[in-house]
Amino acid sequence: MRILLVEDDPQTAGFIGKGLREDGHNLDHADNGKDGLFYATTESYDAIVLDRMLPQLDGLTVLRTLRGAGNRTPVLLLTALGDVDHRVEGLRAGADDYLVKPFAYAELSARLDGLTRRAARDAGSEPTRLRVGDLELDLLKRSAARAGKAIELQPREFRLLEYLMRQAGRVVTRTMLLEAVWDYHFDPQTNVIDVHISRLRQKIDQGFATPLLHTVRGAGYRLDA
């Protein structure tokens, strides 16, 4: 996805930017509302991550200006103001979702995925099947097959494979897997990932000439045809 981040705090912007780039997204960054509004109105984005409190133009002004101009890009509003009145104000200004600081990157990533899925569904283009090479995942039937041969997956294995297929061709780190598949925001210092990757590799690669699930030494894993 192509994402615009409008955040003036260097530490927060660095934290978010690092995670989004590791997830394979293309990112533009503005550190004030005026530049953020310029980017948002002159470029095309899949989603906008917008801080509420910004120099030059505050986040709500940027948001109201976008919506007033008919820009419907999904917007995730970030704020340190977490009370109900401020959340309602942000949503009424046109935000699609609201995230209160501090937050885990996994939550921001999940909310962005939800926003873009909803936007795709509203546009009638939400995929119900994922495909990498001859491997196919049916999200409605919760089934998997490779070259027409059914693959039995446990719920966690299905979730792991779905995440890898959505990130096909990209290196997925252990941290990304812990956050996205196990909802861990820390390293539990166990071999849970190794065990599940090994089981998944046996199920989707064993008996086939071309392996799909690759270990990238020192980095993580990549599903790639």
Image (cartoon, rainbow, N blue to C red):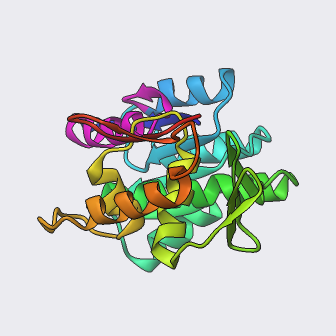
Horizontally, residue 6 falls left or right of residue 212, namely left
179 over 2 or under it: above or below: below
Asked if residue 218 can be seen in this view, the reply is yes
Of residues 71 and 193, the one nearer the viewer is: 193
Q: Does the magenta stretch include residue 183?
A: no
> Whole-percent x and y of residue 96?
62, 59
- Identify the image quadrant of residue 31: top left
Q: Which residue is drawn at 41% across and 61% down?
A: 180
Q: Which residue is drawn at 54% across and 68% down?
A: 158
Image quadrant containing the C terminus = top right
141 over 121 or under it: above or below: below
Q: What stretch is highlighted in magenta?
A: 10-32
Q: Residue at x 55, y 62 (%)?
A: 97
Of residues 74 and 129, the one nearer the viewer is: 129
- Identify the image quadrant of residue 62: top right
Total numbered labels placed on residues in the image: 0
Of residues 173 and 75, the one nearer the viewer is: 173
Image quadrant containing the N terminus = top right
218 over 134 or under it: above or below: above
Of residues 15 and 200, the one nearer the viewer is: 200
> Whole-percent x and y of residue 49?
49, 45
In the rendered image, the residue lying farthest to the left is 189
Q: Residue at x 37, y 47 (%)?
A: 53
Horizontally, residue 80 falls left or right of residue 77, namely left
> Whole-percent x and y of residue 57?
46, 36
Horizontally, residue 136 falls left or right of residue 95, namely right
Asked if residue 100 can be seen in this view, the reply is no
Horizontally, residue 183 falls left or right of residue 188, namely right
> Whole-percent x and y of residue 125?
83, 51
